Image (cartoon, rainbow, N blue to C red):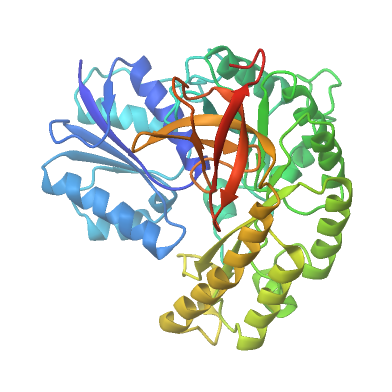
Amino acid sequence: MTTVSYVSLGCPKALVDSEHIVTALADEEFSVVGEHESAGVVVVNTCGFINQAKAESYAAIEAAIENDQEVVVTGCLGVEKESLQDRFPSLRFVSGPGQTTEVVNAVKHLSQKGVASLLKDRPYGSESGNRVLLTPDHYAYLKIAEGCNHKCTFCVIPSMRGPLESRGVRDILSEAEALAKNGVKELMLIAQDLSAYGLDNHYGANSNEQAGLREDIFLLCDELSSILPWVRLHYVYPYPHVDKLISLMADNKILPYLDMPLQHASPDVLKAMKRPASSEKTLNRIRKWRELLPDLSIRSNFIVGFPGETDEDVVLLLEFLEEAKLDRVGCFTYSQVSGAKANDFQDQIPERDKLDRQDLVYEHQASISQDRLQRHVGKTLNVMIDGDIDGETVGRTIYDAPEIDGLFYIRNAENLNAGDLIFARVDHCDDHDLFGEYVGHQVGLR
């Protein structure tokens, strides 16, 4: 069996692309491994959203080339094909994101494993239920739409992945059922704009296959809640119809968690970014949501150092954080992306100033996050076990997503397995994690 090395970089949306490519390679009887010097072909699924991600992608490509391996480059950085081939003249194949068939055919050609090409648009793993997961077995990402209709000036996702293209409800539910059957207990829904799901199909009106079943995010989540115990939402915009999702959370049908990338709070910066919401409307919406669901956990990402951003704009962002009391915050320094309109904006910010502003945001948010965590102290919470760190059992509450949020370090929790759903009592917290003690299993959900 021919061995192929696979390196997956970037966001969860890219990870799902990688899972479909790896599944297709396995279907073609390739042995797929992580970084491995003995593999003849290396596939690198790249990220090109920020400079740090680009550097990581370049390093992975360079390492494989230096090891005299054939390199197949795909993913978001692949849209800069000419630039990549100028930088690495020995590259034999470069593609953009989501091109499973083309990538597998390139691997077959470079490995000289037969000449028959794969059929384009064949589903790999989703319908048959044999999708290879690159996450732990107990949780998975499920991409419900591709592309984006927004025109943010710092982003080139629409040019890389096209406009919004929603999957059919039945297709999504079929994949969710297959994942649940294979042991997945936590499903994280992802799309570039999750809350716009179905808009491109007029919420099912243009879809013959759905036979009248409305396609919108509320009804989809309602259906998914009967398939898996934990359903978590990522990349939700604060549209008015998100109010209905909060009601599902209040009814314990989906997790009380929103990952909502707001990017900034200054009206001037948001206007320059061409973001679709105002900070005041967003604050009002958050207040309304927490009136209905006080324990709602909200995560958001912000960009500092956007061209033209002033010290006053940063103060407005800090004031917004104080008002919004978000549970988790990621903060990135603005980075130019090839093809983005903001590259040509005047008043570009020096890197040192960007880093100083990033530090300011994180320092300001730390006490807010700790105050939000403090409300859990003394309570018994629903927890999913992820494994152990240095012999100590760790899990996550319903308020925390894997990898990006905090952990729950649990005492007296021997003989638990990843994916177990338990109750644990919180003794104390810091500004990121919870600490406490095992209470018992959730009946019927071990």
Note whether residue 260 is visible: no
Q: Quadrant of the N terminus?
A: top left
Identify the image quadrant of the C terminus.
top right
Please state the horizontal and vertical placement of residue 430, each as a whole percent of the image: 54, 56
| Residue 396 shown left or right of residue 65 in the figure | right
128 left or right of 313 in image = left
Please tell me which residue lies in front, 66 or 202: 66
Kindly identify the residue that appears in the image at 33 percent across and 38 percent down.
Answer: 390
| Lateral position of residue 296 relative to residue 261, left or right | right
Say whether residue 432 is left or right of residue 196.
Answer: left
Asked whether residue 172 appears in the rendered view, the answer is: yes
**Up-down: is 124 above or below 43?**
above
In terms of depth relative to the viewer, which is nearer, 344 or 336?
Answer: 336
Q: Residue 312 lies in what quarter of the image?
A: bottom right
Residue 195: give x, y in percent of width and height: 75, 44
Q: Is residue 33 above or below residue 301?
A: above
Q: Residue at x 47, y 83 (%)?
A: 353
The answer to which image quadrant residue 85 occupies is bottom left
Residue drawn at 16 percent across, 31 percent down: 40
